[in-house]
Image (cartoon, helix red, strand yellow):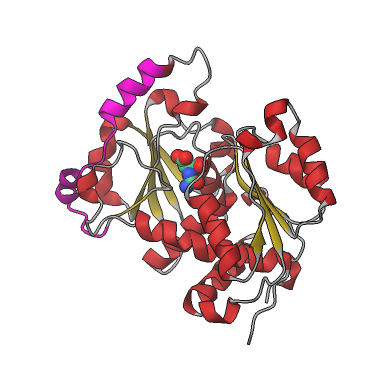
Amino acid sequence: MGKEFKGKDIISINNLKRNEIDLILDVANEIEKNPHKYENCLNRKIMIPLFFEPSTRTKMSFQMAMMQMGGNIIDFNPDLSSRKKGETLRDTSRMVNGYNPNVVIIRHNKDGSAQLVADVISCPVINAGDGQNQHPTQTLLDLYTIKELRGKIDGTKIIMAGDLKYGRTVHSLLTALNLYKDCNVTFISPKELRMPSDFIKDANNVKIEERDLSDLEKSLRDVDIIYMTRIQRERFPKGFEGDDLYEKISRKYCLTLDMLENSGNSHIKIMHPLPKITEVDKKVDDSKYASFWKQAENGLYVRKSLLYLVTGGKNEE
Ligand code: NCD
């Protein structure tokens, strides 16, 4: 299943069709249910994770996925690499290509960096987040979680809250929802951090509404899911009111258990790509609303699916 994926780069949700996404999610589900069948499917395959930005879940789940399927990993620490001496990403990538890995994962703070690496490296390259642009593997695990929660993705009513300007997870999730039918997205953010107009323009198949941060509580009633995001302080450009803005926003922006209980919507679920800082009160963590722990776990199955498909892994039927 999925032979057409062999050798493919995963750079942007824009490069995937709906039936391809559905296939990745189906394979992830099959792997979640039958992990033992895939224990050796990446034998002798080698992954190089080029993480130039901090990562906990994305890096660890890719590494775990590789190891649980019999593959190997080369360790890479940007702070102990030649980047510190001024080597360019293009040169590092060209050199990596010469070692002939089976798959390369790239996370970098520059928009477009994943495509740059894919242009130089001949094996499949997977984008694990390029600046404020895209985070396609997060989106695939988000879609997997939405399907798990609702049984389908069509017709999803979702609030995207927080830093919609610099948050790459909501950018690629919006792009993906545009491929499905009858989705409603409500953006709730501080006015300084609104969803960029280009992403809105491209999502013309999604019904979109924008609301102010002060409308967070009353908006909970009408949706299936609230997708919370962290304020991406490290991406604020210099001169963008910086720390003052962060302090102002983080004081106003917090989803509490009381807000959820008072919403009258007992079915609402909270998703979050994590890490969460102050935007979700910790009393929510063990409530029936919190879906972000299983969402993070789903990253393992979706990344196993991607590694299996793009490297052309062989499972035991
Ligand atoms: C996200 C990211 O890196 O964009 N994290 C993740 O991969 N789960 C979200 C964030 O850092 O806020």
Give the image location of residue 266, x and y in percent: 21, 58
* Residue 188, quarter of the rendered image: top left
Give the image location of residue 116, x and y in percent: 76, 39
Magenta span has 244?
Answer: yes
As rendered, which of 148 and 86 lies closer to the eye? 86
Residue drawn at x 40%, y 24% as measured from the top left? 191
Q: Is residue 99 above or below residue 254?
A: below
- Pick the quarter of the image with the C terminus: bottom right
Q: Is residue 281 above or below residue 39?
A: above
Residue 30 is left or right of residue 151, and the answer is right
Can residue 153 be seen here? The reply is: no
* Residue 39, quarter of the rendered image: bottom right
Residue 20 is left or right of residue 252, and the answer is right
Give the image location of residue 186, x and y in percent: 39, 42
Magenta span has 57?
Answer: no
Residue drawn at x 38%, y 50% as measured from the top left? 158
Which residue occupies the extreme front position in the image?
80
Q: Is residue 132 above or below residue 179?
A: above
Residue drawn at x 67%, y 28% as measured from the top left? 84
Which residue occupies the extreme top position in the image?
239
Which residue occupies the extreme right position in the image?
98
Residue drawn at x 49%, y 23% as measured from the top left? 236
Q: Which residues are magenta?
A: 243-267
Number of marks present in the image shown = 0
Q: Is residue 76 above or below residue 69?
A: above
